[in-house]
Amino acid sequence: MKTMKKVFMTAMAVMMAASMAACGDSASDSSGSSSGVKIGLHYELTGAVADYGTAELKGSQLAIKHANEAGGNYIEVVYDNKSDTTESVTLAAQLASDGVVGVVGPATSGASAASYQILNDAKITVVSPSATAINQTLNPTSGEVYDYVFRICFEDSYQGAAMAQYAIDTLGKAKAIVYADNASDYAKGLADAFNAQFKKLGGTIVATDYYSAGDTDFNSVLTKFKDMDFDVLYIPGYYNEAGLIIKQAREMGIDCEIIGPDGFDSESLIDLAGASNLNKVYYTTAYTTVGASPALQAFIDAYKAEYNEEPGMFAALAYDSTNLLIQAIEKAGSTDPEAVRNAVESINFDGVTGSFSFDDTHTPIKSVLVVTLVDGVQGDAVAVSPDVD
């Protein structure tokens, strides 16, 4: 990996930032600075999935702090979309009006998709840390790739297939139940990909059932599952419901392997499920601290020093997304929208969540990690590259 110094800023970027400040591109930040290069941070800071957005804001702010300590002059413009897609549309328009050079966020696919058309039309580069939905970077009307939209996470179709491959090849499981959110595109994309790959590899989907976001009592459906012949339970969803499903499943004696997506990656999963219930639990992720490299350990140490907590996947993805945008501005030597966008598209990025370049859909080419939980703590990590068409 590149050294942390190299990731953050070069002397050319310092000179560039100074020249841009002279041109009058200004905003105010908490330190009282009145001029600099504005970066929009658009996250779910309250509402149903605030854990994700709060972690990503911390990752982004740490990246900007490091860049500024290295001589840059970046100003964060922070907005809370309240975990609401309608609010996300409103804030996208506000960010365009604010004159930001680029936007990092939101954390979730729905809120991200709602913001893309406005920001793309305004020629503002968007880097999505964790918008994993299938075809997320494509305009739903034309089917063409948004010129100014990029993401640094893998697609749900890929992580769903990876978990199916892991369940059969590594765990040796062949009979799965899928229990999914009935109204989430995230859950649907994951479930469809998992089902297709699991059956392709010779597995059987014993049953599929659904819950609704906000549900808290899953005992009726789990009781039905308990009487079925299956050896693995796949829960494609977010930590909010997954934690309670795992807790209630374990309490009624369902002791099989439980597997899930990157939506499991939250400290709240432990709070909801209980650490003792988080054994024989596995999930896909883009980041792990297991076997950390020196560069990754430097990020972990800096994050802990700043926030007095361990960074999770969402913080790390946002840290990389923000650094990628800063590097692109540096590479472009300008805040010209097309120059920044072109620099992002052509970048070969080396960050704490891995090294990658972008494919023709502005999605990174990278492996999926599957982590094992032991009493709620990551105990192992395996890279999986599913055999998909």
Image (cartoon, rainbow, N blue to C red):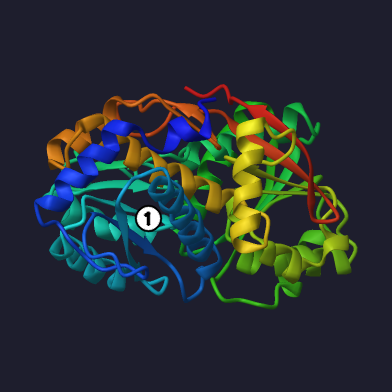
In the displayed structure image, the side of residue 389 where residue 128 appears, left or right: left
Q: Which of 60 and 314 is in front in this view?
A: 60
Q: In this view, does 276 lie above or below 173?
A: below
Figure quadrant of residue 338:
top left
In the displayed structure image, the side of residue 276 where residue 180 appears, left or right: left
Q: How crowded is mark 1: few (under 14 residues within 10 Å), some or many (20 or more)?
A: many
Q: In this view, does 225 lie above or below 272?
A: above
* Quadrant of the frame with the N terminus: top right
Q: Please provide percent x and percent y for residue 96.
A: 16, 60
> Tag 1, which secondary structure?
loop
Q: Please provide percent x and percent y for residue 271.
A: 74, 70
Q: Which of 53 and 359 is in front in this view?
A: 53
Q: Which of 131 and 178 is in front in this view?
A: 131
Q: In this view, does 215 lie above or below 238?
A: below
Residue found at x 39% / y 24%: 348
Q: Please provide percent x and percent y for residue 361.
A: 31, 32
Mark yes or no: residue 264 visible: no
Q: Please provide percent x and percent y for residue 84.
A: 37, 72
Figure quadrant of residue 147:
top left
At label 1, the amino acid type is Gly
Residue found at x 45% / y 71%: 45
Q: Name the residue under label 1.
A: 105
Residue found at x 75% / y 41%: 175
Mark yes or no: residue 350 visible: yes
